[in-house]
Image (tube, rainbow, N blue to C red):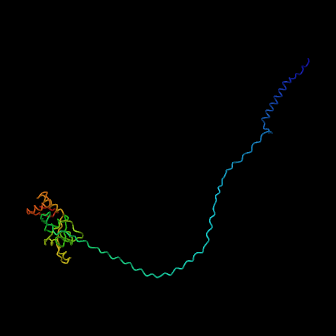
Amino acid sequence: MPTAPHVEPPRLGRSVLIQLLALAAGAVASELPWPRKNALPEPPPQPPHKEERRIRVVRIERPPPPPPKTAAPVPEKPAPEKATPPKPAPQKPAPKKVDPPAPTRIAADSTAIHGVRMRVLVPRRADELAAHLRNSGGCLVVSRLSGGSAEVVSVLGIDGMRAVERPGPPCNGVPRLLREGALNEALGDPLGRARAANAGEELVLQVLLNDRLHDAAQSALRARFGAVSEQEMGRLAAQSGYELTCFAEPLGAIRCQ
């Protein structure tokens, strides 16, 4: 039996296969890290940014040259001190003279009001008079009579039933002469003590009654004569012979009728 002849593949299919293999080999070769001759060089790194500094130029003037040194003046020798006389001791000023206070002048006695004659009866016992003065605020004075007025020599207060001298001006009030010697003796003889201290001058004892005496007298006159003028009161009292009588009571009240 004869052997079959060898059959060769067609040439066209072989050439196609060879081209496919070449393309695959080129693709693989392109992925490999082969150096590239025609690769562009990488740009050089940029230098770091430098900070711009500005310098300010200030002109400094030179100080003026120091003044030339001058020779120090030679101190003059002090003149010898003259001996000064000792100062006189300061003299003490002479004390100023204080003028004594002007004497207080009051009426000698109260015997009338609004032209109407008036009697004022005061207690004759020392204890009752002292009680009236304490309760009414009155006081006693020793005075020097001069014409129709009196000059106060001393002011008296009441200590128990004794009249004692006290400083200061007299109290305000209506003056009434006390002529009873026994009452002066019962009060400790203030009149005799004042006369001995004033070279035996003629002095009198007075009581200054509270100013309410005038209010009591005015009320009594209006009750008798009505609301008339003072001149009319005096005229009516003189026609009728009326005399106002007032009483200084131990409790301090003053009543008139």
Identify the residue at the far top of this view.
1
Identify the residue at the far left of this view.
240
Quadrant in the rendering for residue 71:
bottom right
Could you say where residue 248 lies in the image, as x and y percent from the top left?
Answer: 14, 64
The correct choice, above or below, for 114 with respect to 25 in the image is: below
Quadrant in the rendering for residue 216:
bottom left
Identify the residue at the far right of this view.
2
Quadrant in the rendering for residue 140:
bottom left
Could you say where residue 152 lies in the image, as x and y percent from the top left?
Answer: 20, 71
The correct choice, above or below, for 74 with respect to 174 in the image is: below
Q: Nearer the viewer, residue 101 or 14?
A: 101
On the rendered image, what quadrant is the C terminus found in?
bottom left
On the rendered image, what quadrant is the N terminus found in?
top right
In the image, taking residue 98 as reference, residue 111 lies left or right, namely: left
Q: Nearer the viewer, residue 123 or 114?
A: 114
Q: How many marks?
A: 0
Could you say where residue 177 lies in the image, as x and y percent from the top left?
Answer: 15, 69
Could you say where residue 51 lies in the image, as x and y percent from the top left?
Answer: 67, 50
